[in-house]
């Protein structure tokens, strides 16, 4: 498998989580940093803070989501969900079954506008988590402030400096000044 890391706007997208256990709860915690448009389908769950529909999965439920996470925990059911998603053209993540995933959850560092995703393409999520922890320790405390200031600079500069190479030089100098 070859996963391309890209960032996409999910502000108007809904994530459908099928399953209500600890793994589903973990996926929800990761998603909540980016969206509150999350629906859980599970006959029993202790998950709170998102819309929960207490029932068994059926393929008609897929109409509720733009992305699906199959986290029932029963391999045959999770794989059936993946097949149903593919038939419906809906991207799916099947927990702990990389072969059936259209997308995967990276280990994420998020500080304000900065998002860094680390993936081992499913070969070692533990290693990705360890790298994430190291990276979090390396980031400067003021990274959010630096990004806000750089955004302001870009907004002002793009209107005043037509040459892209000159803008790049200005951005680099400003960034280096802020980081030293």
Image (cartoon, grey):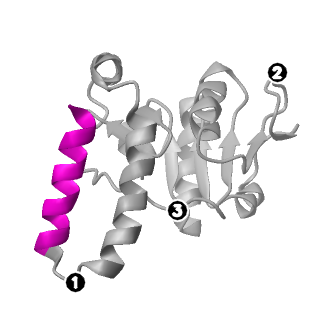
Residue found 17% across the figure and 64% down from its top: 168
Within the image, what quadrant is residue 160 found in?
bottom left
In magenta, the rendered stretch is 165-180
Q: Position of residue 125 (x, y in %)?
A: 34, 24
Residue 97: mark: none
Within the image, what quadrant is residue 57 found in?
top right
- Which residue is the extreme one toward the bottom? 162
Q: Is residue 76 left or right of residue 119?
A: right
- Mark toward the viewer: 2 or 3: 3
Q: Is residue 175 shown in magenta? A: yes
Within the image, what quadrant is residue 65 found in?
bottom right
Residue found 84% across the figure and 26% down from its top: 44
- Local secondary structure at mark 3: loop
Q: Can you identify the residue that label 1 sits on?
A: 162
Q: Is residue 123 left or right of residue 31?
A: left
Q: Is residue 91 shown in magenta? A: no
Residue 46: mark: 2
Frontmost residue, 148 versus 134? 148
Q: Are marks 1 and 2 in contact (CB under 8 Å)?
A: no
CA distance separating discs 2 and 3:
29 Å
Residue 1 appears in view:
no
């Amino acid at each position: 498998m070859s996963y391309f890391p890209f960032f996409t706007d999910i502000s108007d997208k809904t994530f459908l989580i099928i399953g209500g256990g600890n793994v589903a709860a973990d996926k929800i915690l990761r998603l909540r940093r980016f969206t509150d448009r999350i629906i859980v389908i599970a006959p029993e769950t202790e998950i709170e803070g998102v819309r929960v529909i207490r029932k068994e999965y059926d393929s008609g439920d897929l109409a509720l989501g733009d992305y699906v996470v199959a986290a029932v925990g029963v391999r045959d059911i999770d794989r059936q969900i993946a097949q149903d998603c593919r038939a419906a053209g809906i991207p799916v993540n099947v927990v702990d079954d990389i072969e059936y995933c259209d997308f995967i959850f990276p280990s994420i560092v998020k500080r304000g506008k900065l998002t860094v995703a680390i993936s081992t393409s499913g070969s070692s999520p533990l290693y990705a988590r360890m790298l994430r922890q190291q990276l979090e320790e390396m980031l400067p405390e003021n990274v959010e402030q630096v990004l806000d200031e750089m955004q302001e600079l870009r907004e002002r500069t793009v209107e005043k400096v037509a040459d892209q190479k000159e803008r790049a030089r200005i951005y680099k100098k400003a960034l280096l000044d802020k980081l030293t």
